[in-house]
């Protein structure tokens, strides 16, 4: 009998980053590398250090509004830029300052972009920031192949190549219907599915950010349940935005993966252990 037998899940929905894929060496590195590039190339200021730390990343993941890692980069650079100094090292917010700022954003009821544009005297260019992050993640070759544009820098190898699977089995071997609800774009998901060996995963069973649905909205979970013809999802996630999505749905169970959500009722260090605990 599974130790989680009281759960009545009739389908499984996975987040991707930190759940299906180990992204410790990809998205945090994208942010860390992008910040001085944006500071120097887009803002024309002095880039003396790369001040982004793992503590900044972990702090960000406590806030549902920061599900999109490229928004973390934009928010941190914008907060630094608003101080009006040339030096990135002198301007960059500490993890504590970043946390306090995000608490203000969270309680305001505004989006991150709206709050910063309303409360800061200057921000980083949003679209250009995302392009910089995208190209670091995809690398030069995949920027051409998947994004269909010539990269601004020709020698980026792509941090996606440093990702590794966190699950060994094929999605078709899981004895419950499977969906994916991710903050990745669909083209970012293509790369993850390639590494997982899940290239045959049905497109309509994955909800991505460019579908116009983003966590912490429950809409992605609801839509997947309807497509799977199921009612009670077991959602595997690792961040506050994942858990908030299921809470907003109002049904189902949440399985926390990793160390970020220490107060979760059900939490496992990795998805394979969690699936075994379910007796699947």
Image: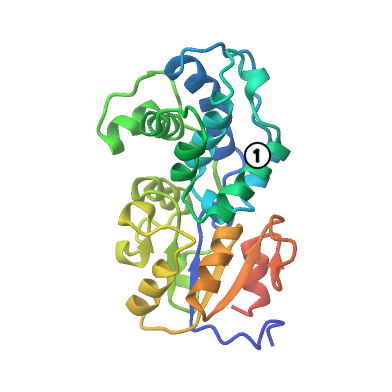
The residue beneath circle 1 is 98
Above or below 33: residue 145: below
Residue 112 visible in image: yes
Give residue 24's quadrant in the image. Answer: top right
- Residue drawn at (56%, 48%) of the image: 105
Determine crowd level at label 1: few under 14, some 14-19, many 20+ residues with C-alpha closer than 10 A: some
Looking at the picture, does residue 85 appear above or below residue 254?
above
93 or 26, nearer to the observer: 93
Residue 138 location (% of width, % of height) = 41, 34
> Which coloring applies here?
rainbow
Quadrant of the snapshot with the N terminus: bottom right
| Residue 91 place in picture, x, y as percent | 63, 22
Q: Viewed as shown, does residue 144 lie left or right of 254?
A: left
Q: How many callouts does the rendering have?
A: 1
* Callout 1 secondary element: helix
Image x and y of residue 113, in percent: 45, 42
């Amino acid at each position: 009998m599974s130790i989680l037998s009281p759960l009545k899940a009739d389908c499984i929905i996975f987040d991707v980053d930190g759940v299906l894929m180990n992204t410790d060496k990809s998205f945090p590195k994208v942010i860390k590398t992008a910040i001085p590039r944006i500071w120097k190339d887009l803002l024309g200021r002095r880039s003396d250090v790369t001040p982004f730390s793992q503590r900044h990343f972990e702090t960000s993941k406590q806030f549902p509004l920061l599900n999109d890692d490229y928004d973390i980069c934009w928010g941190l650079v914008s907060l630094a830029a608003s101080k009006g100094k040339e030096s990135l090292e002198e301007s960059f917010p500490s993890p504590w300052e970043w946390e306090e700022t995000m608490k203000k954003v969270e309680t305001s009821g505004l989006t991150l972009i709206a709050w910063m544009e309303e409360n800061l005297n200057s921000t980083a260019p949003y679209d250009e920031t995302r392009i910089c992050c995208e190209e670091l993640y995809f690398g030069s070759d995949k920027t051409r192949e998947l994004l269909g544009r010539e990269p601004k820098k020709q020698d980026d190898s792509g941090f996606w190549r440093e990702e590794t699977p966190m699950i060994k089995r094929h999605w078709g071997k899981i004895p419950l219907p499977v969906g994916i609800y991710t903050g990745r774009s669909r083209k970012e998901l293509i790369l993850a599915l390639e590494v997982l060996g899940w290239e045959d995963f049905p497109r309509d069973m994955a909800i991505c950010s460019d579908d116009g649905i983003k966590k912490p909205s429950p809409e992605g979970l609801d839509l997947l349940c309807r497509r799977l013809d199921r009612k009670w999802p077991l959602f595997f996630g690792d961040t506050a935005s994942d858990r908030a999505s299921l809470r907003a749905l109002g049904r189902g169970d949440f399985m926390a993966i990793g160390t970020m959500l220490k107060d979760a009722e059900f939490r496992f260090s990795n998805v394979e252990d969690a699936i075994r605990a379910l007796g699947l």
